[in-house]
Image: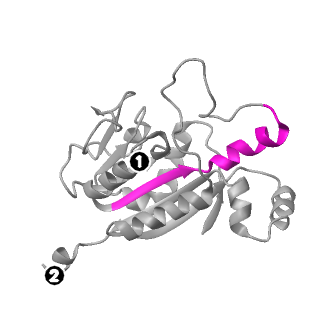
Amino acid sequence: MKVHIAEFRQRQDRYRYLVQEFQRFLAGTVLDVGCDQAVLRAMLPAGRYIGIDIGGDADLRLDLEKMEKLPFGDCTYDCVVCLDVLEHLDNLHAVFGELVRVSKAYVIVSLPNNWANARRPIRRGRGSIGHYGLPVSPIADRHKWFFNLSEALDFIRGQEKRYPLRIIDVRVNEKPRPYWVRTFRRLAYRSIMRYLDRYAHTLWIVMEKQPSPIEAWS
């Protein structure tokens, strides 16, 4: 598993990282599920991008939690992208299945490590955890699932067994820190996964869709 130093202060930072690191998978048509302001559109050639979301600058407005299926046929898009979206959905398992169904070749997913955001306020005994808590009034932008990096990776590996997928790239992000800080932290943990569960903030997975047995023999 690769560890990259990167920090995403705004949503467009995450998309810049996507294009920088995974450009080779974005060569064809791209479906951006949960696109928000659709910043990826301007980073790709015209005519290759479709973004869907409940609001923002989506090409197609769609409530992912109320749909039964994405309004596209099987194997419609060369690459399906879903960045830090699944954790916002009660029906994330069903939506993941739809990502696979409409993809022709690749699915790229990023998931947050919620433990990393919770670490400091819990240790200090004060503060709040972004996208969680108990607000006075309902809010739209909140997480429905609380998990660490290991659990996110286990979830993806489980989907790899469930669907015709093969994981071809796994990487995580840590925030920029002085080398001595990262070295000291790493020495405190014998297990790399315990270290990443505590300090890594994002998991990236690239999956390649495999042909069904019928397709393989055709």
Indicate the amino acid at tag 2. Answer: Trp
Query: Residue 92 — which label?
Result: 1
Mark 2, other Cα within 10 Å: few <14 / some 14–19 / many ≥20: few
Q: Residue at x 54, y 57 (%)?
A: 152
Counting residues from the start of the chain, the first of labels 2 and 1 encountered is 1
Horizontally, residue 44 falls left or right of residue 141, namely left
Query: Residue 115 — which label?
Result: none
The colour style of the image is one colour
Whole-percent x and y of residue 182? Answer: 81, 59
Indicate the amino acid at tag 1. Answer: Leu
Q: Quadrant of the C terminus?
A: bottom left
Q: Which residue is mark 2?
A: 217
Whole-percent x and y of residue 108? Answer: 42, 56
- Residue range in magenta is 106-126
Vertical arrangement, residue 83 with respect to residue 124, above or below: below
The kind of secondary structure element at disc 1 is: helix
Horizontally, residue 213 falls left or right of residue 94, namely left
